[in-house]
Amino acid sequence: MLGAGASGSAVVRALAARGVAGPLLLVDDGSVPIAERVWASWLAIEDAADDAVISASWRRLVVATDRGERVLGLTRHRYVAVRGPDLRDATDAALRTVRGERLTATATAVHEDGDSVVVATSSGDVRADLVLDSVGLLDAGVREPRAWMSFAGCEIETDGPVFDRDAVRLMDFRVPQVGGATFAYTLPWARDRALVELTTISAEPTSTRPDIAAHLDRVLGAGRHRVVRRESGVLPLAPRLRRPRSARGLAIGAAAGLVRASTGYGYARMRRDAARIAEQLRRGEPPSGLRRSARHHAMDAVFLELATHDPATLVDSLDLLFARTPADLVLRFLDEATSPREEARLVSSLPTRPFVAAAVRAGRPFARGRALRRQGR
């Protein structure tokens, strides 16, 4: 197993849950300390109840634009957060169950050698029957990102009760729109503690430092506060339809395209992928994991085109989407769990012209056919 982040940890835990014995070697270079990470996502209620590492959960989401705030109640989902230390401890316990161990080293190459696969690491070569790769060594092709997600934020403590502990501010667009679609995100741990980030989806990576202080003061009314920690990063958003694989290797996690390019979310899909891989291995089958549909791949490209070149339309469309559609259905759509009929219902609530134009610019072949049908040809 290459990489001990969310995807590698999910597979180790899924193997332990299904009684799949190793031996298993988890190779990670430790360059991103897991103890400093937080993963957040929405999960179906039954999945949230089944995940022992969830640190906190919420029943309501807030989406805000200049028109005002929408408070969205969740009936079939929970928005959840997983802290790195909890995930690390659960993974270590699962490793013991599957006769596994950790190797702190940098994996640099993977090649097949007869009936096995050899992984070159900074601590020497490792030979295995199968490699699951979350660091991208199986990807021989070069994918140019369609967009970039730049984020910067801080976890703060306030002097008094400021935050609504029961609601996550998922997208608040009442911030300066700089170079793309920009929104604020607030994850409240308590009435006086929260993680607040500003995120921009743009055509090029941005080094602009967002004015978080202005958002804390003007929108959240945080008042006097202390910064507990800071975080920032830039993620390439490159839609992937097919995951890299070889006869004895399979990409997982972000390297497999499980982080959805249009949202930056991947935790829920990584859990489902891990469960499928573990079940396939339990049955003695070659692992293939989740498969992605071409229509979701196309939708990602259109979303990113709007985010980078027409963010005002995207913001208005998201506002309409949440106004006209139950939040749980929107979340299932964003998680690629909807049927074509459900997606048609969602699309019908959106303005046609700008989406068709964006699809044409993104090079999606279905756009012209849809436009001609609407013209009666």
Image (spheres, grey):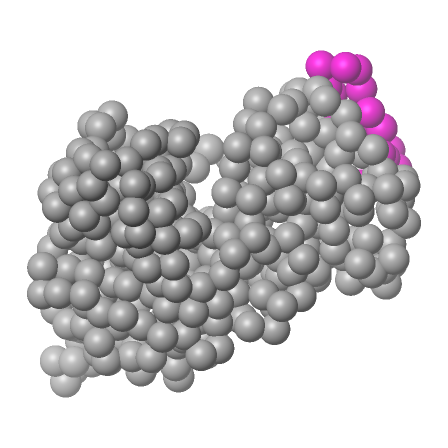
Q: Position of residue 198 (x, y in %)?
A: 27, 41
Q: Position of residue 219 (x, y in %)?
A: 16, 50
Image-based side of 14 in relation to 344, left or right: right
The residue at 35%/38% (across/down) is: 156
Depth check, front residue: 340 or 51: 51
Q: In the rendered image, which quarter contains the C terminus? A: bottom left
Q: Is residue 143 above or below residue 338?
A: above
Q: Residue 6, position in %: x, y?
A: 60, 44
Secondary structure mostly seen in the magenta stretch: strand
**Does the magenta segment cover residue 117?**
yes
How many marks on residues? 0
- The quarter holding residue 9 reads top right
Q: Is residue 270 above or below residue 152?
A: below
Give the vertical position of 53 relative to 166 (above or below). above
Instruction: Classify residue 316 as left or right of residue 36.
Output: left
Q: Nearer the viewer, residue 325 or 187?
A: 187
Residue ranking furthest to the front? 160
Magenta highlight on residue 173? no
Q: Is residue 4 left or right of residue 141?
A: right
Q: Quadrant of the N terminus?
A: top right
Q: Is residue 270 visible?
A: yes
Residue at 82%, 53% in the rendered image = 16
Instruction: Find residue 277 and report its image quarter.
Output: bottom right
At horizontal 50% and vertical 42% (from top left) the residue drawn is 38
Residue stretch in magenta: 112-131
**Image x and y of residue 337, in percent:** 49, 71
The structure residue drawn at horizontal position 74% and vertical position 55%, both measured from the top left corner, is 14
- Residue 199 seen in this snapshot: no
